[in-house]
Amino acid sequence: MRVITQKTVGDASVLEVADVATPVAGPGEVLVKVGAAGVNPVDTYIRGGGFPALGEPPFTLGWDVAGTVEQAGEGFAAGDEVYGLLDFPGTGGGYAEYAVLKATSLVKRPSWLTLEQAGATPMVALTAWQALGRGGVSAGQRVLVHAAAGGVGHVAVQIAKARGAYVIGTASAAKHDFLRSLGVDEVIDYRHQDFTEIEPVDVVLDTVGGEYAERSAGVLKPGGVLVSIIPGNPGFDVDRASALGIRFELVLSVVASGADLAALPQLKVQIDHAVPLAEAAKAHELVESGRTTGKVVLVP
């Protein structure tokens, strides 16, 4: 089968196609013929050596996939349409024609998700689900989501709305209509508006990092929660949050759960680009541009 591999860390040009043996599912596992594999920012970090979760190359990136069950077993029948998340951090392997996943990390693909949408969903949906859960988002709360039209952001605003929250999203002006279509109550053009001037909020979801975390602390109500999915925010940690009368939560490791995927609302997952598997370098360049709306997927 074909996979995308890399022999060294570096820019997107290190990604290359290779032929390897098709993997074999073991006890508690399912072999899936991949129809679409999500491309996430963390993939680009690992490829470049900035997040060495896999150790030294060669390795194959990719954690969320959708496709068909190749061989019956573990509660799934051959031909079942499924989607799920490989263990993260873990060995990856989603950028391939076939992938082996734990049966407990798979769920049958729901009717409201296309194959490409399902391949784009697991990591961002579970990240948003767990981050908003860590923040304790509930009905009546005010929630600020940064980069709200991005992969995690556009899913997070839908989950927050499903929980009854008033949602504010930052994005460029060109993406405001898209966010309104998802139910966002208030949109902020980060290029021309200062988000710190809004009325205080209960929860901030930081998907950007850097100064955004520090500035976001200033818009939280006393006892509010700042949830970040970006590691290494300089000068911002639990002690500083405590001093400001807020709580800081960092969500990095995503726990794959078929039950959690099944419990998510009927998400609208936006596909910005569907890229052939052999053009994985192009997919990484799109993600790294920071200009995509929603997700990029690889299609074997």
Image: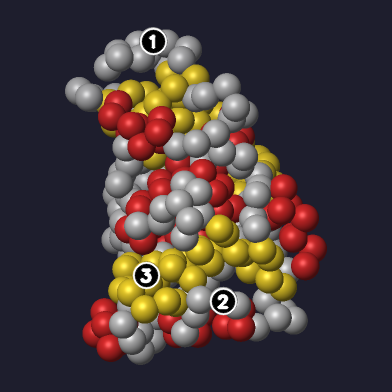
Q: Is residue 170 left or right of residue 50?
A: right
In the rendered structure, which disc, 1 or 2, sits on the residue that comes first in sequence?
Answer: 1
Q: Is residue 30 above or below residue 64?
A: above
Q: Any mark on residue 199, and which?
A: 2
Residue 118 sits in which quadrant?
top right
Q: Position of residue 210 (x, y in %)?
A: 48, 81
Q: Could you tell me the amino acid type at mark 2?
A: Glu
Query: What residue is rendered at 50% in x and 36% in y?
Result: 265
Q: Furthest-front residue in view?
A: 140
Tell me the distance, in whole angstroms, between the alpha carbons under discs 1 and 2: 52 Å
Residue corresponding to mark 1:
77
Mark 2, Cα crowd under 10 Å, few <14 / some 14-19 / many 20+, is: few
Q: Is residue 211 visible?
A: yes
Tell whether label 2 touches label 1 (CB within 8 Å): no
Q: Is residue 112 above or below residue 154?
A: above
Q: Any mark on residue 225, and which?
A: 3
Mark 3, Cα crowd under 10 Å, few <14 / some 14-19 / many 20+, is: many
Q: Could you tell me the amino acid type at mark 3?
A: Val
Q: Is residue 76 above or below residue 219?
A: above
Label 1 residue SS: loop
